[in-house]
Amino acid sequence: MKKRRYTKTFFILLLLLGVAENNSVWSQKTDVDSLLNAAINEVNKDKNYDSALKKTHKGIKLAPDYLDFHLLAGRIHQLNNTKDSARYYYNYVIDRNPVYEDAFSYLINMDIEDKNYSDAEITVNKAIEAHSGKKDFRYKKLAIYELQGEKKKSEDYLKEMQAQYPKDTGFKLHYFIADTRQKSDRIGVNYNFTTFDRSGYGPWHYGSAQYIRQRDWGSAIARINYSNRYADGQTVAEGLQYEAESYLFTGKNSYSYIGGSYSNDPVFPKFRLGYSFFHNFEKGWEGDLGIRYIDTKDSGITTAVAGVGKYLGSYWLNLRSFFQFNESDMYPAFTLTARYYFNTRFDYITLIAGYGTSPDERTTIGQIQPRLSLDSYRLGAGYYKIIGGHYITGLQLNYNNQEYTPDKKQNETEIALMFQYQF
């Protein structure tokens, strides 16, 4: 009995010692966490970096494998502008446990800020390897190439990312913007044929020949337009219009449109002038503001333009509003455009819906004056494709329910063909 009592007592003592040890470990863990939280608060709230750094050094001594203290020490040194020490701690964390995304991000951003692009590229490659599903690091790699002006590397990397993430809005937008900055030249022709269900009216023929010069500063377009309107089987109006347009890059995420045209034939307005400013925001948003002026034979028409666009994966949606002022009256027009892109910015299908007559519609611009105050409801669909990297083709069908006098309407059906050669 006495032996059994000693054995029982021994086990109770072992249990108590184990509990005491666990409590000690738990207490130490709690103290270390409290120390880390206190240091973080001093960095974020109090901006007391010296005191916070002392706490992190104490934490490192108490728990040398607790990498959060090393990460915080690196951040404090970066904020204090002692960047060599910051790099030491960030690399220490990355080498021992690459799961820490913040260590990669802080180190990459610091090297980009200091223009140490080669070091930043090495680190971002490590980050991509450790976090292959994290697209933020892939965007960082693209930014590094762009900041260095490495156009070829940027283009190749964008193509790679476009293939890997075909639905990603950011990569698609970057890809399209980069593509518009590449050197290329295009010549092309357009032809539009419009029929009317009103007896003795139409058809209309509209054609154009154009040259497009694209460079890293933007693009310049020269165009000659021809219009021929029939009624009762004979030409009632025809003529030529001379047009010049340009898209100029005004920043990394912005560009401007400038355009003008002249004609001495009554089938076109005498003058058309236009300007718009476009800006690409984050998350695939684009906005534009602009102005148009048309000098007709009767009066001048000034138009304020406002638009908003959004990339959603392979989709692009755009709503553009036109507020047209003629004498003392204002006439609105709206155009909603939806596109689904395939591989390039030349490969897409499009749907268009609109109300009213706008100064950006080429085939009806000669009749903008009488149509302004009349109702117009438009629908359209088109398919565009680049073949062999050189031949760009397009087919579009448009339907317009047009009021031609108050309370009287006609149906207009238009087929539009486009062909360009890129070299």
Image (cartoon, rainbow, N blue to C red):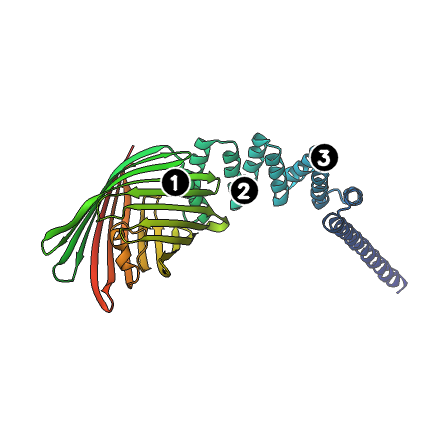
Local packing at callout 2 (Cα closer than 10 Å; few below 14, some 14-19, many 20+) is: many
Nearest the viewer among 4 and 277 is: 277
| Image position of 185 with respect to 263: above or below | above
Instruction: Indicate left or right for 195 with 214 as reference.
Output: left
Q: Residue at position x 54%, y 36% from top?
A: 125
Q: Quadrant of the C terminus?
A: top left
- Mark 1 or mark 2: which comes first in sequence? 2
Q: Confirm whether residue 107 shows in the render.
A: yes
Instruction: Indicate left or right for 397 with 46 as reference.
Output: left
Q: Which residue is mark 1?
A: 247
Q: Which residue is mark 2?
A: 137
Residue 355, how many percent across, how many down?
32, 61
Local packing at callout 3 (Cα closer than 10 Å; few below 14, some 14-19, many 20+) is: few
Q: Which structural element holds mark 2?
A: helix
Query: Residues at badges 3 and 1 in contact (C-beta under 8 Å)?
Result: no
In space, the residues marked 2 and 3 are separated at their CA atoms by: 25 Å
Looking at this rendering, what residue extends furthest in the left direction? 233
- Disc 2 residue type (three-letter): Phe
